[in-house]
Image: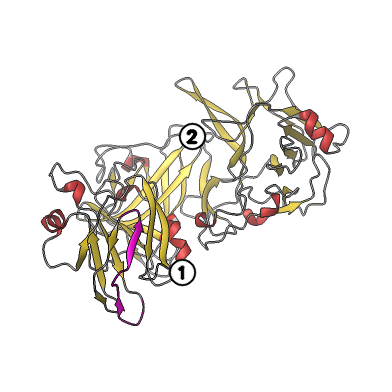
Amino acid sequence: MYHPVDTGKPEDPNTEYIELTNVGAETLNLNFVKFTNGIDFTFPDLQLAPGACCVVVKNRSAFETRYGPGLPIAGQYVGSLDNGGERIELRDAAGAVIHDFRYEDNWHGATDGLGYSLTIRYPAAGPIGSWNSRNAWRASVVFGGSPGTDDSGNIPNAGAIVINELLANSAGGGPDWIELYNTTDQTIDVGGWFLSDDADEPTKYEIAKGTKIPPQRYFVISEDLFGRSSAPGCHKSFGLSRSGETVYLHSGANGQITGYSEEGKFGASETGAAFGRYVDGAGRSHLVLLREATPGAPNAEPVTGPVIITEVMYHPDNPANAEYVELQNISDAPVVLYDLVRGAPWRFADDPNDAAVEVLFPQDPPVTLSPRAYLLLVKDRALVESRFTIPAGVQVLEWGAGSLRNAGEAIYLSRPGDLDNGVRSWIAVDCVDYSDGSHHDEFPAGVDPWPPEADGGGMSLTRAIAEHYGSDPLNWRASTPSPGVARQRPIR
């Protein structure tokens, strides 16, 4: 419990705690075991039986005022847990590390000052390094957490009910909608669960009591319900933004959220275009634009192209500024990188809202890519041309200021969307969320599969199958740089 809820009572900030569980088969003596980072505490001569829990607290009096007496308190620590996230380290009496991980406040909104504790999903399973990952944690089942007891088994397992598809820019004045999907072999009761578009107000819409989703079945909720204040279950109406936002799903009981949660982040979209859940080869879920909307049925394939990112040189070995990104038109028709209707060009950027690297494609005349043709975006044209041989006829555009991040980031090729209050939205044509291979905590299996050889080793990232999803790390290889050179790539 790193960020207790503030109810106005003086003891509220002091009701922090950390719970420990013995997941082994033998009783452990915790004498001289120490928290050496995050908080300062040394355990007394304490025997912890198999399966038993104990808690260390910031302030015993405040804790017992909130949770009552009789709980297995090992002692009172010095310091405070950081509301913004920090590293926690536990060492044994000899100084060897037992546990060392970092939590973040943006993992689960309900744990960041809304009254729920951050709870490990499977204490006795998985590599201990996975504790650094959001996916390893959930919010507690009940408000206030469950210090000294195990609350698992009271909610579905992670990934049981998912946000599977949604429409945020409906056509002809029709309603938007959100589709849930039961991934399990058991019927799950979602009555009393909540949907919202605001992490700080998670209970905007409450699903009707008695609503059950059968195994491998879908449940579609219309904006006529969550977007109409007079509709049953609508506590505060909301709509889905055509410019993109995040949708939150929480389990609930008796009008309060409980420990199961899912969220789906999506970008800008054209009228009638739906986003659907896509699981990449590393086990991560994404909401991506689909070829067609399929409410209540299996998702269509993700949209790919017509222009994609095919090669990324983000960390050249020499010279350092010889960065480039290669694009290719994978369609059989010319593509103009300009929207005549909106009067705006396409865009390449490393962040939709705060770009360090940005290219707004020329407008007069606009860039046209012939079928199967390449286009190079470079930081410094002279350096790239001195380092690599670029085939004649390949168009080259320079972005100048800013550099691609060596540690990895998401890069976007986008076409213009509508103006909202004078601000242009951007509809992603392709996105590559690359990594240098060192961010193991961001992947469910605890292993970052992006090839590290492209991180300053003289290699570039090269897309393996042109028509496969761009941010799937298993669709990329470290290869000898070949900007603008046609390569034999498998095409589905």
Instruction: Look at label 1 and name its amino acid.
Output: Gly
**Distance Cα–Cα, label 1 vs label 2:** 45 Å
Q: In which quarter of the image is residue 397?
A: top right
Q: What element carries label 1?
A: loop
Residue 93 can be seen in this image = yes
Magenta span: helix, strand or loop, mainly?
loop
Residue 126 — which label? Answer: 1
Q: How crowded is mark 1: few (under 14 residues within 10 Å), some or many (20 or more)?
A: few
Q: Which amino acid does label 2 sit on?
A: Ala
Find the magenta span and give its range.
24-39
Q: Can residue 152 be seen in this view?
A: no
Q: Residue at x 52, y 30 (%)?
A: 354
Q: What residue did someone put label 2 on?
A: 171
Task: Say above or below: 402 vs 72.
Answer: above
Q: In this view, does 149 lie to the left or right of 351?
A: left
On-image quarter of the N terminus = bottom left
Q: Quadrant of residue 398?
A: top right
Q: From the viewer's perspective, is 24 left or right of 243?
A: left
Q: What element carries label 2?
A: loop
Residue plotted at (24% across, 69% down) = 44
Residue 239 vs residue 389, the one in the foreground: 389
Residue at image location 65% in from the left, 57% down from the top: 474
